[in-house]
Amino acid sequence: MTEPSDDTTIILSVGTGRNRQDIAGALLFSIRHHRADRAVFLCSAKTHAETLPLVLEELGNDAWTPDRYVVHVCDDEDDVQALFTQWNKAWDDWFGDRPPGRVVVDFTSGTKPMSAAAVMLGISRGVETLSYVTGPRDTGGRVTESTGVRALTPDLVLAHRRLRLAVEHFHAGSFAAAADLAGRHLRIAAMPDDDLREKARSVHFLAAACEAWDRFDYKQAARHLRESDRHWNQWKWLSDADRLRAMSELIEAARDAVAKGEFNAALAADLLANADRCMRRQDWDDAVARLYRACELLAQMRLLRDHGQKTGNIDPEKLPENLRAEYRGRRDRADGGRLKLGLEQSFRLLEQLGDGLGKKFRELYGDRDARKPLQGLLNARNNSLLAHGTVPITDDQARRLCDHIMELADVADPEICGKWLPMARLPEFKEF
């Protein structure tokens, strides 16, 4: 990778002024003030013909050779958007193969659209400095003599735009990108504005918490939220701080369930919420993988809670008498003497036990001779690349499977959808 140069390049919009000489003098003043090594002149046809020759003549007296400057003549000096697009496209041509070092954009002269487009270009490209020449003015408001240069760094404008972009990523569910963008502005050195820095902190911590949450790293997600909870009431740009408290409660309940090796309503709801976020991002295969696991977890939860059975080690002796012989035989044939049940087998056992969840599953799933929609949707997951096949999941399959799993969840435990799932709603950031 080619290293940036140490040179200073100044990009100047070129105008006409009262007599051309005044603008040429202002541009030369700015070039010399910034000790520029190279220059890019943004001209209209008129200023290319009338003003620029005066500038180049003086630069020649300063021993500037033609290889130290580039001239760009625009097509329409009164169209801001066209100017920005044209100049932005030409940027790489101006600098060639070597990345630029320090870049200054001077918007002292040119038409108002040219100056506006030059500022937009500088901000878009993240230049170090924007500048304009100052001095005493005549009664018409024109500078009569160039005596100074006002320079400003567009860092706050850029930071605000990056934070808005981070918020867009957060709302779209791209939490890692949001945390990274906002995380660049947490230190005073990187963000001197207290208000923007506090906004950056809120986006970063919440996005980092949600990124960990999406990976089911409940400990890290809870830690990020604890680190920021003392600020929640101060973050007025959040739509509803109560959502953060509810979200924290759900995450902590899921964390505790995982730590104890339990299957509970909070954990089931969290899987459904995670699948919903995947669908919002149109990650259909990922969504179905989570929905499949949620379906499996519902059976595990019901068997353990209501029947004292673990799907990874079924104990036939705890089953009703009419089922023991069947499951003893299956256990005796199982590897290692541990009878493990898969998803469909777990729901079949629930059905045999007269459990309402097993009956509901059979109603949605059907059997070998009379297949119902749920069976085909679960098989679509098995045929995806994330399982055993190569067929991508469609949005319709993901949405229909979600509807079926939600029906099962209502039967498994009404608190899954009635209490816990609404607690997974993310807060939203207002405009700032």
Image (cartoon, rainbow, N blue to C red):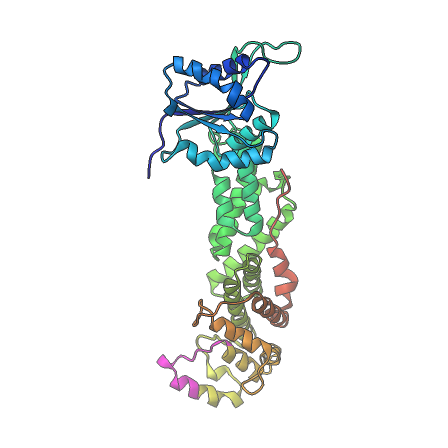
Total of numbered circles in the picture?
0
Q: Quadrant of residue 114?
A: top right
Examine the rendered structure and indicate whether residue 354 appears above or below residue 14. Answer: below
Residue at coordinates 50% horizontally, 56% vertically from top-left?
A: 214
Could you tell me what secondary structure mostly forms the magenta stretch? helix
Residue 185 in view of the camera: no
Region in magenta: 329-343
Residue 92, visible in the rendered structure = yes
Rendered view: 282 above or below 368:
above
Q: Position of residue 236 (x, y in %)?
A: 64, 39
Q: Quadrant of residue 31?
A: top left
| Residue farthest along the front direction in this orientation | 49
Report if residue 334 lies within the magenta region.
Answer: yes
- Residue 179 spot, x, y in % from top left: 49, 44
Residue 369 position, x and y percent, is 56, 87
Residue 220 lies, with reference to residue 152, above or below; the image says below
Q: In this view, does 335 lie to the left or right of 357?
A: left
Any magenta on residue 383?
A: no
Query: Residue 193, position in %: x, y?
Result: 55, 29
- State which quadrant residue 116 falls in: top right
Q: Nearer the viewer, residue 125 or 252?
A: 125
Q: Residue at x 38, y 18 (%)?
A: 64
Comparing 139 with 41, the one in front is 41
Give the quadrant of the N terminus.
Answer: top left
Question: Observer-nearest residue: 324 or 14?
Answer: 14
Looking at the rendering, in which quadrant would you find the C terminus?
top right
Q: Which of 212 and 283 lies nearest the eye of the viewer?
A: 283
